[in-house]
Image (spheres, helix red, strand yellow):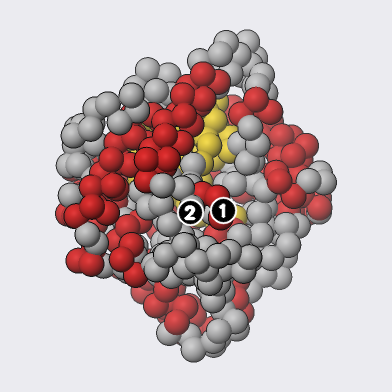
């Protein structure tokens, strides 16, 4: 592989909310439309004046990330960026309202990464029909990706495009991996898991048949890792990586955990991942998304116009506390909260480092510092050297 995934640890950040809009990362883009029913990139492009939407997107692509961000990422001791991009950057032939134009920025970002000595995982974050129904797939709503052969065919064509481009020798020291889908919603049942599995095999073939030695990154589709045991044995497949995501905020039980329970859960998760990854026949494994906040308090984190479990404004939740001390500007964060986040950072990085490593979500946000690696560095709850430990025994 272009990066030694089996022997060197991944330490990286996601470039979230840039080439795929997410309301909670850049709430102003959504609030400024004046439309309450604009809740994802699909409606952002469909429900407001198209020229206005296009101009806003262009400005966002030009300014939200620049090479100075990639220089800061490298200076923070990180070695990877995972860059989400949606299918609509390549194909809107299904009549979708999306505005294209993201692909040149992906290529520009790869150049920035090369200049700064960073490796890139290209993450196809949204597929036609939506693979998970989340706003971060481009369209919030039903999970229709696995239900149409056209959706599968269009997805395959995008992977072919990426495989042809990034198999080129000029990318050998920078684009180390391709992830053909982010977070397919295996929990919806039906045919999504067999379709996803077949899609993974097809993506592997496209990369290898085009001469590419990029690593293929599989997401666990929210299944226990044991579901994937032996999925691509090393006797027949090479350079395959499993990606699992670990958040402790998206259920009532998670947000009710005490701070020590959050540490313990992270430590246990890392042990379980390492145990699976080190079992013969299984795959290198990283935690490709995680964060340092224990609460779902960020504005729009559960969707635009949707409340939070922690303060009881999310449907079916009960109030556990008030959100304002734990979200927004770090100037309001108490010393105890920042100390918690530092411990939580160390628990997760130490634990996830027992397997292949980790990629934090996300480098920057517009207004929610608790989610921002960049703000964590300046605020002191993320160390300038990600291997530094103030709490070396946090996982016992």
Q: Which residue is mark 1?
A: 251
**Lateral position of residue 69 relative to residue 225, left or right:** left
Residue appearing at x 39%, y 77% in the figure: 28
Mark 2: few, some, or many residues within 10 Å (few <14, many ≥20)?
A: many
Residue appearing at x 48%, y 53% in the figure: 255
Mark 1: few, some, or many residues within 10 Å (few <14, many ≥20)?
A: some
Q: Residue 97: x, y in percent?
A: 63, 74
Location of residue 154 with respect to 279 vertically, above or below: below
Q: Residue 5: x, y in percent?
A: 41, 24
**Lateral position of residue 148 relative to residue 234, left or right:** right
Instruction: Kindly indicate whether the residue at mark 2 contacts the one at mark 1 (C-beta within 8 angstroms).
Output: yes
Find residue 315 and report its image quarter. Answer: bottom right
- Secondary structure of the residue carrying tag 1 is loop
Location of residue 201 with respect to 4 vertically, above or below: below
Q: Which residue is mark 2?
A: 255
Residue appearing at x 78%, y 46% in the figure: 189
- Secondary structure of the residue carrying tag 2 is helix
Location of residue 126 with respect to 213 vertically, above or below: below
Residue appearing at x 57%, y 47% in the figure: 182
Is residue 79 among the parts visible in the rendering?
Answer: no
**Separation of residues labelled 1 and 2 (CA atoms):** 7 Å
Q: Residue 181: x, y in percent?
A: 60, 45
Q: Nearer the viewer, residue 382 or 153?
A: 382
The quarter in which the C terminus is drawn is: top left
The quarter in which the N terminus is drawn is: top left
Is residue 95 among the parts visible in the rendering?
Answer: yes
**Lateral position of residue 369 relative to residue 106, left or right:** left
Location of residue 116 with respect to 378 vertically, above or below: above
């Amino acid at each position: 592989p272009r990066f030694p995934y089996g022997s060197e640890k991944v330490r990286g950040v996601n470039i979230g909310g840039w080439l795929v809009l997410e309301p909670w990362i850049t709430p102003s883009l959504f609030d400024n439309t004046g439309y309450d029913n604009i809740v994802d990139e699909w409606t952002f492009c469909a429900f407001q004046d198209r020229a206005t939407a296009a101009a806003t997107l262009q400005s966002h692509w030009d300014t939200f990330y620049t090479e100075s961000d990639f220089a800061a990422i490298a200076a923070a001791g990180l070695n990877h960026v995972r860059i989400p991009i949606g299918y609509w950057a390549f194909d809107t032939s299904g009549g979708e309202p999306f505005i294209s134009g993201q692909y040149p920025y992906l290529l520009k970002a790869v150049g920035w990464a090369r200049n700064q000595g960073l490796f890139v995982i290209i993450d196809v974050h949204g597929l036609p029909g939506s693979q998970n129904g989340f706003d971060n797939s481009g369209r919030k709503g039903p999970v229709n990706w696995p239900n149409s052969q056209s959706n599968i065919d269009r997805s395959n064509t995008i992977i072919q495009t990426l495989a042809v481009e990034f198999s080129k020798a000029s990318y050998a020291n920078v684009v180390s991996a391709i992830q053909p889908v982010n977070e397919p919603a295996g929990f919806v049942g039906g045919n999504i898991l067999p379709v996803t599995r077949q899609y993974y095999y097809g993506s592997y073939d496209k990369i290898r048949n085009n001469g590419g030695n990029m690593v293929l990154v599989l997401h666990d589709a929210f299944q226990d890792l044991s579901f994937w045991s032996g999925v691509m044995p090393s006797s027949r497949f090479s350079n395959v990586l499993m990606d699992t995501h670990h958040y402790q905020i998206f259920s009532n039980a998670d947000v009710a955990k005490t701070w020590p329970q959050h540490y313990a859960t992270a430590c246990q998760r890392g042990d379980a991942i390492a145990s699976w990854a080190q079992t013969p026949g299984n795959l290198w494994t990283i935690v490709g998304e995680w964060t340092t906040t224990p609460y779902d308090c960020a504005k729009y984190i559960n969707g635009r116009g949707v409340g939070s479990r922690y303060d009881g404004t999310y449907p079916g939740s009960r109030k556990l506390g008030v959100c304002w001390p734990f979200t927004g500007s770090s100037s309001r964060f108490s010393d105890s909260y920042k100390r918690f986040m530092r411990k939580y950072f160390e628990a997760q990085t130490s634990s996830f480092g027992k397997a292949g490593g980790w990629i934090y979500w996300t480098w920057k946000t517009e207004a929610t510092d608790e989610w921002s690696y960049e703000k964590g560095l300046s605020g002191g709850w993320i160390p300038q050297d990600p291997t530094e430990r103030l709490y070396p025994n946090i996982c016992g």
